């Protein structure tokens, strides 16, 4: 079947004839079928029971890169408002449903990278199901940064400061409108995957995360098959709590440069100065503590495990954009910036924006 002769495939028919027969016997959707399904979901066409069943069937079946690429293409074409800044930033789309026990360090890492000349964009929603835990927006709010921005203002923020935040209700309102239905599911759906790839800034480089390498390979395949994505390169890190803060210890990094597949390597974060365990990065209040830690690290007032983690994560952003020859060079640059407290000016500029 081709895109031209797909016919009509409402979700109920897809359930009956394609995806709904169980983990072992279900078929995969064609690109055309997956596109129809995503468009119907965004336009609130299916009944709640049908939509829930469809999401759950896809979770059992496990979506292919072709299906995810089709979902992503419809998402970008039909709901995402893209505002491209004059600079080409690293797109950081961590899991929108957030973190629950460790500090969120991407704001500090992004500001250090920006100070080094690597522009960075982060994006998130607000208490996104299923975890509904703190994400980028909440730490920025705690730091006194305005987050309820329309996409054009977000692009200006990137241009002016080198770091910018895009807010999902502003750039993808049709996805935000599905929050209640997603919460009723009680488990993640494929939306949790593709929203991280929405790329509202139109960047050519993405920094993402994964639990297992097989998932990083699936994400790379999704980007390779997408017809709407502008990503030409992606760096995937084995993230702490699935976020885009790299996991301390022995961890995996996967690089995608536009082809089918990734080049992966295992690194020891201790070789880059992060010798602490995951437990050392735990906090009592993810929002308040993450904001306070970010401010102190940027000012050079902390030189502990959190500072080490910010330096390494900043280096990964520089390396993702190929602004440094290797991760070690990025760490050296980040540490020099932190020692001088130079990135504090970027945080002050964010607060004034």
Image (cartoon, grey):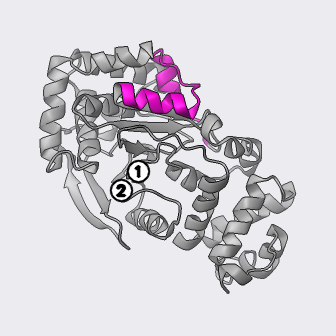
Q: What are the residue bounds of the magenta stretch?
A: 131-160
In the drawing, what numbered circle is on residue 208? 1
What is the x, y in percent for residue 33?
70, 74
Asked if residue 242 lies left or right of residue 27, the reply is left
Q: Say if 31 sits above or below 254 in the image.
A: below
Q: Quadrant of residue 159?
A: top left
Q: Are marks 1 and 2 in contact (CB under 8 Å)?
A: yes
Question: In percent of the image, x 54 and y 38: which residue is there?
Answer: 124
Label 1: how many Cα within 10 Å (few below 14, some 14–19, many 20+): many
Residue furthest to the bottom: 1
Question: In percent of the image, x 81 and y 75: which residue is there?
Answer: 8
Quarter of the rendering occupied by the N terminus? bottom right
Quarter of the rendering occupied by the C terminus? top left
In the drawing, what numbered circle is on residue 143? none
Q: Quadrant of residue 221?
A: bottom left
83 vs 130, nearest the viewer: 83
What is the x, y in percent for residue 99?
49, 37
Label 2 sits on a secondary structure element that is strand
Q: Say if 252 sits above or below 218 in the image.
A: above
> First in sequence: mark 1 or mark 2?
1
Q: Is residue 271 visible?
A: no
Task: Report how far apart the C-alphas of labels 1 and 2 lie in the structure.
Answer: 7 Å
What is the x, y in percent for residue 100?
50, 35
Q: Is residue 322 within the magenta segment? A: no
Q: Would you name the residue on which mark 2 appears?
A: 234
Q: Is residue 149 within the magenta segment? A: yes
Asked if residue 79 lies left or right of residue 158, the reply is right
Q: Say if 24 sits above or below 107 in the image.
A: below
Label 1 or label 2, whichever lies nearer to me, is 2
Question: In percent of the image, x 71 and y 75: which residue is there?
Answer: 19
Asked if residue 225 lies left or right of residue 245, the reply is right
């Amino acid at each position: 079947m081709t895109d031209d002769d797909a016919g009509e495939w409402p979700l109920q028919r897809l359930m009956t004839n394609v995806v709904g027969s169980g983990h072992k016997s279900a078929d995969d959707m064609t690109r055309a079928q997956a596109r129809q399904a995503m468009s119907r979901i965004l336009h609130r066409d299916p009944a709640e029971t049908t939509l829930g069943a469809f999401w759950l069937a896809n979770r059992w079946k496990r979506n292919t890169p072709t299906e995810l690429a089709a979902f992503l293409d419809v998402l970008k074409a039909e709901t995402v408002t893209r505002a491209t800044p004059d600079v080409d930033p690293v797109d950081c789309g961590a899991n929108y449903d957030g973190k629950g026990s460790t500090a969120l360090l991407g704001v500090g890492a992004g500001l250090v990278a920006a100070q080094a000349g690597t522009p960075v964009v982060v994006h998130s929603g607000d208490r996104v199901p299923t975890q509904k835990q703190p994400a980028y927006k909440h730490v920025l709010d705690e730091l006194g940064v305005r987050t309820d921005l329309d996409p054009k203002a977000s692009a200006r923020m990137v241009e002016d400061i080198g770091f910018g935040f895009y807010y999902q209700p502003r750039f993808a309102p049709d996805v935000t409108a599905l929050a209640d239905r997603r919460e009723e599911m009680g488990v993640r759906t494929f939306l949790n995957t593709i929203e991280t790839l929405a790329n509202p800034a139109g960047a050519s480089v993405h920094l993402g995360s994964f639990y297992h390498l097989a998932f990083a390979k699936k994400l790379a395949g999704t980007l390779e098959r997408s017809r709407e994505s502008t990503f030409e390169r992606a760096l995937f890190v084995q993230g702490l709590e699935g976020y885009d803060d790299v996991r301390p210890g022995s961890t995996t990094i996967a690089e995608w440069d536009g082809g089918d597949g990734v080049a992966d390597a295992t690194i020891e974060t201790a070789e880059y100065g992060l010798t602490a365990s995951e437990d050392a990065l735990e906090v009592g209040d993810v929002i308040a503590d993450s904001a306070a830690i970010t401010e102190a690290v940027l000012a050079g007032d902390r030189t502990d495990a959190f500072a080490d983690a910010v330096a390494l994560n900043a280096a990964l952003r520089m390396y993702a954009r190929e602004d440094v020859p290797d991760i070690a060079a990025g760490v050296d640059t980040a540490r020099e910036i932190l020692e001088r407290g130079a990135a504090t000016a970027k945080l002050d500029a964010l607060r004034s924006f």
